[in-house]
Image: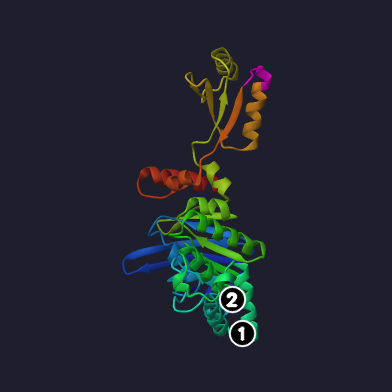
Amino acid sequence: MSATTEQMAPPKGISAVGLRKSYGDKLVLDGVDLEVRPGTVFALLGPNGAGKTTVVQILSTLIAADGGQAFVSGQPLEDADAVRAQIGVTGQFAAVDGLLTAEENLLLMADLHHLDRREGRRRAAELLSQFDLAGDATKRASTFSGGMRRKLDLAMTLVGRPSLIFLDEPTTGLDPRSRRTLWHLIRELAKQGVTIFLTTQYLEEADQLADRIAVLDGGRIVAEGTAEELKRLVPGGHIRLQFADAHSLDAATAQLGLSTAVRDDENLSLQIPSDGSIPTLRSVLDLLERSRVHAQALTVHTPDLDDVFLALTGNGAAHHTAASTVKESLR
């Protein structure tokens, strides 16, 4: 870590500048900058091997960076004990002991956090109730479904009341119902003021949960913003006007005079490129009103996070062109 770490302001979320990490000749992280506001959900997206888990391991003090500087929950990474006292970590695989009951797993964590026996039992009971596991408290964790083990794993992470939680692909392998249950628990934690740093390959998960999203590729952050901001930056958004008959379509095509519009005679529709913003929509509506053309229906289509992910990650000239365009737009 750089000797200039002390010059950075210590925010209570996460602030990282220039994180670098290599394994031999393989460069995994090539100058990663991150800002995570306290009490928010921040999602880090990227393809397999992009370095998402490495970022989590560095910020949670499990491994050291080769360069860069960071504060986590107000503490410099150099002070590993102080950082660990503030955070919780849930990895890709539930770290519960299958030979112990749900309650025993939680009591074990209470002992590790040096809670006295009474407080430990109270905290365990509180978390079992919060995670809807009270009815299974005396069952061995080895009998639990994948979703139940994930819930127990997250409950164990919360025993010490961390102010910041790292969730490294927490819903991997879960069925849709279990995944949505975990989403609900994550939202509730965020409402309670817990800062959550989430890595995931499920784009819908990031869309549903994250206040801000960063895309990691080639060891660098290639884009960052809210889900809606990222979607608007990728080409493909459009406004679709549907008309009742060919005459109305002809009139719209002539009156609107938009050279970029795409006409579909079979479906009696006109497709107008759009960034999905309200000003763009308003301008189209104003054009329709001034031209006195009646559209039967209007729908706004914006790219989803799948489109964002494909545009920003991978190799080849197309990727680099798209990534450069997005990064310039974000400035």
Residue furthest to the top: 247
Q: Mark 2 points at which residue?
A: 159
Could you say where residue 32 lies in the image, as x and y percent from the top left? 48, 62
Whether 294 is among the magenta residues is yes
Asked whether the viewer can see residue 73, the reply is: no
Eyeballing the image, is 62 above or below 241? below
Eyeballing the image, is 286 above or below 37? above
Q: Give the range drawn in magenta.
A: 289-295
Could you say where residue 30 lies in the image, as x and y percent from the top left? 42, 62
Q: Name the residue under label 1.
A: 115
Residue furthest to the left: 25
Q: Residue at x 62, y 81 (%)?
A: 121
Q: How far is mark 2 from mark 1, CA to CA? A: 9 Å
Q: Which residue is drawn at 38% across and 60% down?
A: 49
**Three-letter amino acid code at the position of disc 2:** Val
**Three-letter amino acid code at the position of disc 1:** Leu
Q: How many marks?
A: 2
Residue 129: mark in rendering: none
User: Dot 1 lies on which element?
Assistant: loop
Q: Which residue is drawn at 48% across and 75% down?
A: 140
Applied colour scheme = rainbow
User: Dot 2 lies on which element?
Assistant: loop
Query: Is there a contact, CB below 8 Å, between mark 2 and mark 1?
Result: yes
